[in-house]
């Protein structure tokens, strides 16, 4: 940022009592109220840095307007299906991509190791857990964050070369994003770290049945407008992160026409019908790919302090920021507060995990929880909590998305575009709703709940900003 | 009712200031607060009658508990499809059934005459409007209210012998109810009084394609649980009267499995797919039949003052009451307040029309509007209005339905079982949301809005109650 302090109108930074700021504002002075709360409160170094960065408020505001406009104007459309190695640029035969910021095999949490084991068995590179662990540790495979391959995956997010992915195009911006198909349905879900025979069966079913049928349907439809489905589903009780029953139903209504038109085998339609009937999470991966295609369009805007990714690998969590490129700002993954399936407790839970916080990054998910009140039954909390999440997130975001509205809040748009500076100023950290995986490899899903992205990652992002 | 005044604990009727009632209640006296508002206010005859009826409050309460329990415990399941004359007891070849209380051909409103004309053309008894009008006026056909044939139909509700209907069984009580299929989709809808060639085409499509396919699917599924679909849809933004997008989607998810399993022609599945994709009202008729099967179980309970039917024929509106059998209590049909399609105004609108108020009678529809906030965009009003409807209707109903919950009101059950006495005591009349038909035969749908059942019908019902 250029140092043009003397050319700018003065801005007053007010810390503490808001009454001073109010008075100055009434007298036409630009005031930034520093509403510090712990942990930033009292940290002199952070305060000074924030003050220095905020001297460039005009430039930052312009950059953030540009960034959030990219988000609001995005038009994500599901256009194709293909194997990861065939369609994702840079995805090699020996790539294994995963959720969250970078992590080595040795530092991976239990469920992520479980999914890597499952992936190597799926790839026929190992016959069992022991063999797979050897291969994983051998250095033969390269572990890469999904986000660095324009990809997102729920929970462990593990993806191998011969797994099918959906291709989502942001028609406004031209960029592509990718996601595997949802692995819930039959057996323990692969994405939660399971790798046994029932999980392998589901992976083969996705590759052999779901993906080819979807490819026919999506191409025949000339693309499926995901923004339209998300917009409608938000008015039908979904948040499009952990409640997706309406979005899945709307997607299926589009796909079935194309499957029947193309005379896809009756057995395939029947089995897909059961998948769509029983797996209300099917649309999660489409929702995530849509949000990834949306947020990637807002990357690399100089001076923008808007968050472009929040992701968790179960060991660490991290964010990326538009003006700071592909740099990760990380912290230890926190525990999730939630509701557990019978027989499980917080003791069994892995810390926060998954790329699915791309939905909150894009302004839906927990940010739209006031649109999805029935979700409180899954993740805990009250109706008032859910409404409060959406209201509070508005305080740390740059805009309301007119395409994504919240009926219970008089149809205001979802709070969109997390601003690192607002997070620090207000002392409010983003909320995320999430599934909970067992901390042990192979065990799978044990609950769902609510978690926050730690303040530490925003503090680190601030410190990396140019003065 | 037996006159056992001297054996009962005294009950005080308090009219006017509630403070007197409050004080008496604090002293353990049963008090009935008469919260009179116009039009009943000041009507001495009605006041006296209400006082006499309320002397039997204990008996009435018991009967109403029994009646509303029938409603809460109902289990409506769609079990079959057949032609009206084949499956509805008492439906003759020359029967034409219609919405609302009884009405002669001469007194029918424009759109109902339009549907009768359309029905006679469909039945090949007339070639055009002029011929059909002659036949209709000739006395050859018998006009019968749907409600008297365990049937309900939206708007004009007109049904002829060779039209297919769905058969819904109340598995708890054993009674059956019937409804035609929804006629919206292609062309101007028959149910709104249209009768031209595009309407005839849709009627033939229902008979030749929709009904046979649905019969296969419903039988193959062993019945479709409509209570389950309504319950889920109420948590997905539907009220199941004028917002049915989620319910239609959930129904389709069930049906498609059976259609594919039974290898129904791909062309048929494709065309049904388009119907389900474009006609978000498809489930209206299933919802109505479910409510009819529910409410009929609560008929003829001696002393019960619960409303078992609210229905409108476009000329008159009427109610039936459990303890008063099949007697209709009627008033002139009121105008609907609503939003009109471009080119139409209230001047073009027919007064209130249709059996679909069976949904409100059963506690959904406008009574559940707080669950369906996006509906305000169709029928007008604000989010606050919609929430207020559900809260206010609780004041004139007997129970909350634990199966049908309203997320925005902390998941309280929908207000269920309208009590004629509460309506009179509180001066609050039931609210209904509704489509609006043009008053001219053949013109079809022109808008949607909100209407109330007039106080007069409740006053008449009161006067018919035994002392």
Image (cartoon, coloured by chain):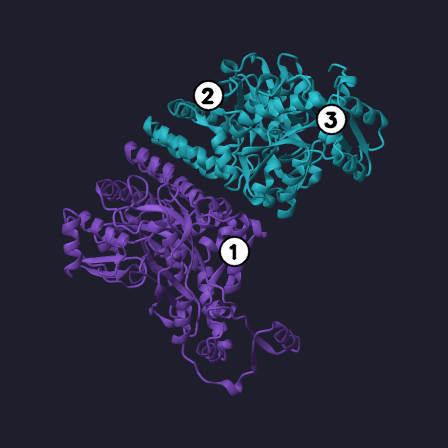
Chain colours: A cyan, B purple
**B432 lies above or below A173:** below
Identify the mark at residue B390; answer none if there is no mark: 1
Mark nearest the camera among 2 and 3 is 3
Which image quarter holds the N terminus of chain A?
top right
**Residue tagged by mark 3?**
A457
Residue bearing the label numbered 2: A81
What is the chain identity of the residue bearing mark 1?
Answer: B
Asked which secondary structure carries label 2, the reply is strand
**x%, y% of residue B370?**
52, 51
Query: Is there any visible trace of residue A323 in the rendered image?
Result: yes
Label 3, secondary structure: give it. Answer: helix
Is residue A343 in view from this perspective? no
Of B103 and A200, the residue lying toward us:
B103
Answer few, some or many: residues within 10 Å of disc 2's Cα (few below 14, many 20 plus, some between 14 and 19): many
Report whether B96 appears left or right of B321: left
Disc 2 versus disc 3: distance between alpha carbons? 34 Å
Q: Position of residue A138 (x, y in %)?
A: 66, 13
């Amino acid at each position: 940022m250029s140092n043009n302090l003397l050319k700018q109108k003065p801005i007053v930074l007010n810390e503490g009592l808001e009454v001073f700021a109010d008075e100055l504002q009434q007298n036409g002075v630009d005031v930034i109220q520093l509403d510090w709360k712990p942990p930033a409160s009292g940290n002199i170094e952070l305060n000074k840095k924030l003050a220095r960065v905020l001297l460039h408020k005009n430039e930052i505001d312009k950059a953030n307007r540009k960034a959030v406009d990219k988000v609001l104007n995005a038009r994500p459309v599901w256009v194709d299906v293909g194997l990861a190695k065939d369609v994702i640029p840079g995805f090699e035969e020996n790539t294994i991509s995963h959720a969250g910021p970078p992590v080595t095999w040795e530092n991976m949490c239990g469920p992520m190791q479980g999914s890597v084991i499952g992936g190597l068995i799926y790839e026929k590179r190992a016959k069992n857990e022991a063999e797979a662990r050897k291969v994983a540790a051998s250095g033969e495979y390269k572990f890469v964050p999904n986000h660095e391959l324009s990809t997102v995956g729920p929970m462990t997010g593990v993806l191998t070369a011969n797994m099918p992915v959906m291709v989502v195009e942001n028609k406004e911006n031209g960029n592509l994003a990718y996601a595997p198909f949802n692995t819930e349905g039959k057996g323990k879900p692969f994405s939660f770290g399971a790798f046994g025979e029932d999980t392998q069966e589901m992976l083969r079913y996705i590759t052999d049945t779901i993906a080819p049928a979807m490819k026919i349907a999506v191409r025949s439809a000339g693309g499926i407008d995901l923004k339209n489905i998300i917009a409608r589903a938000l008015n039908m009780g979904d948040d499009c992160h952990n409640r997706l029953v309406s979005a899945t139903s709307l997607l299926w209504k589009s796909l079935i026409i194309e499957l029947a038109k193309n005379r896809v085998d009756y057995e395939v339609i029947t089995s897909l019908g059961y998948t769509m009937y029983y797996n209300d999470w099917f649309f999660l991966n489409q929702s995530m790919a849509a949000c990834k295609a949306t947020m990637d369009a807002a990357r690399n805007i100089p001076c923008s302090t808007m968050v472009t990714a929040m992701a968790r690998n179960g060991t660490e969590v991290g964010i990326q920021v538009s003006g700071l490129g592909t740099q990760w700002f990380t912290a230890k993954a926190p525990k999730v507060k939630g509701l557990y399936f019978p027989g499980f407790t917080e003791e069994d839970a892995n810390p926060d995990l998954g790329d699915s916080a791309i939905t909150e990054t894009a302004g839906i998910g927990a940010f739209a929880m006031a649109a999805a009140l029935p979700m409180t039954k899954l993740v805990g909390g009250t109706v008032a909590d859910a409404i409060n999440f959406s209201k509070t997130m508005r305080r740390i975001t740059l805009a309301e998305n007119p395409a994504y509205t919240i009926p219970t809040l008089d149809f205001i748009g979802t709070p969109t575009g997390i601003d690192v500076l607002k997070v620090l100023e207000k002392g409010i950290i983003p909320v995320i709703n999430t599934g909970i995986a067992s901390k042990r490899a192979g065990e799978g899903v044990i609950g769902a709940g609510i978690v926050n992205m730690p303040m530490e990652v925003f503090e680190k992002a601030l410190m990396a900003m140019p003065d």
